[in-house]
Image (cartoon, coloured by chain):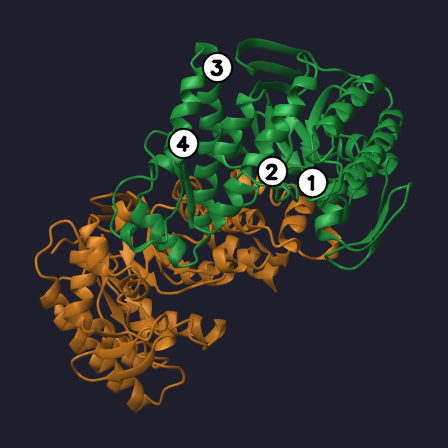
Chain colours: A green, B orange
Amino acid sequence: MAVFPYDIHATDGRARTGTLRTMRGDIQTPAFMPVGTAATVKGVYMDHVRQAGADIILGNTYHLMLRPGAERIARLGGLHKFCGWDGPMLTDSGGFQVWSLSKLRKMSEEGVEFRSHIDGSKHMLSPERSMEIQAELLGADICMQFDECTPFPATPDQARASMELSLRWGARSLAAFGDRPDQTLFAIVQGSTYADLRAESAQRSIEAGGYGGYAIGGLAVGEGHEMMCSVLDVTTPHLPADRPRYLMGVGKPIDLVEAVYRGVDMFDCVIPTRSGRHGQVWTDTGPYNIRKAEFAEDDSPLDPAIDCPASQNYSKAYVHHLIRSGEMLGQMILSRHNIAYFEDLMRRIRTEITSGTYDRFVSDFRAAWA
Amino acid sequence: MAVFPYDIHATDGRARTGTLRTMRGDIQTPAFMPVGTAATVKGVYMDHVRQAGADIILGNTYHLMLRPGAERIARLGGLHKFCGWDGPMLTDSGGFQVWSLSKLRKMSEEGVEFRSHIDGSKHMLSPERSMEIQAELLGADICMQFDECTPFPATPDQARASMELSLRWGARSLAAFGDRPDQTLFAIVQGSTYADLRAESAQRSIEAGGYGGYAIGGLAVGEGHEMMCSVLDVTTPHLPADRPRYLMGVGKPIDLVEAVYRGVDMFDCVIPTRSGRHGQVWTDTGPYNIRKAEFAEDDSPLDPAIDCPASQNYSKAYVHHLIRSGEMLGQMILSRHNIAYFEDLMRRIRTEITSGTYDRFVSDFRAAWA
């Protein structure tokens, strides 16, 4: 299979900036991937996602296999054509959301049987089926191995058993993925909060051979910011320096800044769109809610520093009114602004790393969030 | 007050095409005005409303006075600045929606006292207050006289009493509107379904002097398409040929085509956005619902003939999926497409009138809708 070229341009401590070159375009790292759950980044036109600065978006295998169905998307020409995004796309393996969303799960060595949270219909996911959906039917550029997201907390024994299962499923994922010159497969490192297991999971994933990148799974599941940072501290040193590292499902701006500081290159999270639908506006010092009475007559734009029409062209008072009135446009503007904020943050992070000033940037960011 | 220049370019039977020149730009007629109820055309960015071909949008006095409040909009620089629409804007008088939406109404010669449908707060509308809100606080380019929308059905006595009230309120509206060089006031002709009353209402409104245009009120209230056409037949001949004629709250494409045929120049309706939110796609032969199973794998665009990204760039299968999944983007795409369809229809109507072929266009349109 393809291992996409990854050029590291600069490093600053453990932080790095680089370019991952896929068949559908380049991804500047550190990169934030907006989440396009059901073949749409909720409430945002794809051209606005692109304008906001996203190089790549994420699609959810679980949602798409249930509705409209992976075979249907394949008959319609694949996920890129279906949703109108012609840049790189990454799909998750479906495993995490089977556990968080589906009903009546039955797990075995083979895989997971479950019922749809939408209509109760019966489905199955296994390493082989996940690869078929991601690589063959949806046509993702970057696919993820099928894994089990180790629940938090887990005893050392539970964490090891779960890690071993993910390693076996990883080997089957590699075999099922096969030889795909235009697509790549990422491993997912598990091991819960245990340094020795994280190291072992990383080492054995590398030894399996052929992965184009390495994800860190099992975080952002309730362990908290401090623990997440601790796990990254003992995990990223075991990942190959020349391959992209992807922290799944993370996170808030401070999480991104701290994870980059620890050598992570890629992120995805629903926060920009989900919190935007609830009136939250992201800034360097955290989010504020535009519903608050203090914004009712605030004529200033959401954030004039962000190069995005949603951030510059609407007053806080207007968006306050829209959100309070339940108007769709308010959700559209905030989702778009928040994505632009996250992408702008990644651009600034890349600049600081290039300038060798990332340490100071992190210190300032921590102080602003404290 | 200003009577905006109105150049009639061509007539074909009673149908006319022209340009109404406001201080904020020209309006090509016959014109369809998308409705921006609460300072937003629901689910559509203002630049997309403009791209779809709209020259003018409508704002609702009733909604805006309740939320965020007319005085607040004034403090924020007026409705145009507030919502980011720099073209011409028309506001209704608020009278119709007080009757259709508010609670605990108390009507008198002075005006109407009512309670907000949002929070139960007490408010008042009168000719003087409506003019203050529309002209002074919101800053509409085209304001509407305060009137009573005669309920349907009405006896001749009821219709006359209601019409007389609207004429008295019209005179007070004119006086309150005063001398505004950059804004204009339209009369509203009432008279229910009675030809003699419609003629009298038109004549006395003209005699009142100073109106920049004439609206036809009290239609689209349950009388049906045939009755609406009949009332237009006996009303438009009494309106000045050199002034724009505006049929309020109408309507479906066939209504627009028939009303233009009877000499109407301007329209507004929530249909494009409201029905779009429910999955309806408008075409020359009526609407279809994209939720239908037959579109699940239909790879063709919504309507390749409409020069709008929403109409051309998304497959029916994709929009079907989005609407079935409750995704905002589906509602956004359909609302935008439907506005583009309505604006495209008006463009074609103008072209047919200019070509002197409107009779045939109407015949074909009737046949397609039959």
Q: Name the residue under label 4.
A: A308
Q: Nearer the viewer, mark 2 or mark 3?
A: 3
Residue positioned 74% across, 26% down in the render: A196
Instruction: Name the chain under label 3.
Output: A
Displayed quadrant of residue B67? bottom left
Counting residues from the start of the chain, the first of labels 4 and 3 encountered is 4
Real-space CA distance between mark 2 and mark 3, rounded to the nearest whole angstrom: 25 Å
Q: Mark 2 points at which residue?
A: A35
Counting residues from the start of the chain, the first of labels 1 and 4 encountered is 1
Real-space CA distance between mark 1 and mark 4, rounded to the nearest whole angstrom: 26 Å
Residue B208's spot in the image, x, y percent?
13, 70
Instruction: Name the chain under label 1.
Output: A
Instruction: Name the chain under label 2.
Output: A
Q: In this view, does B110 lie to the left or right of B92?
A: left
| Element marked by disc 4 | loop
Q: Residues within 10 Å of mark 2 (few under 14, many from 20)?
A: many
| Element marked by disc 3 | helix
Q: Can residue B212 be seen in this view?
A: no
Q: Are marks 4 and 2 in contact (CB under 8 Å)?
A: no
Q: Which amino acid does label 1 sit on?
A: Asn
Q: Is residue A161 visible?
A: yes
Real-space CA distance between mark 4 and mark 3, rounded to the nearest whole angstrom: 23 Å
Position of residue A226 relative to residue B163, above or below, is above
Q: Which amino acid does label 3 sit on?
A: Ile
Q: Which of A320 and A261 is in front in this view?
A: A261
Q: Do the residues labelled 2 and 3 touch (CB within 8 Å)?
A: no
Q: Name the residue under label 1.
A: A60
Q: Residues within 10 Å of mark 1 (few under 14, many from 20)?
A: many
Residue B74's spot in the image, x, y percent?
19, 54
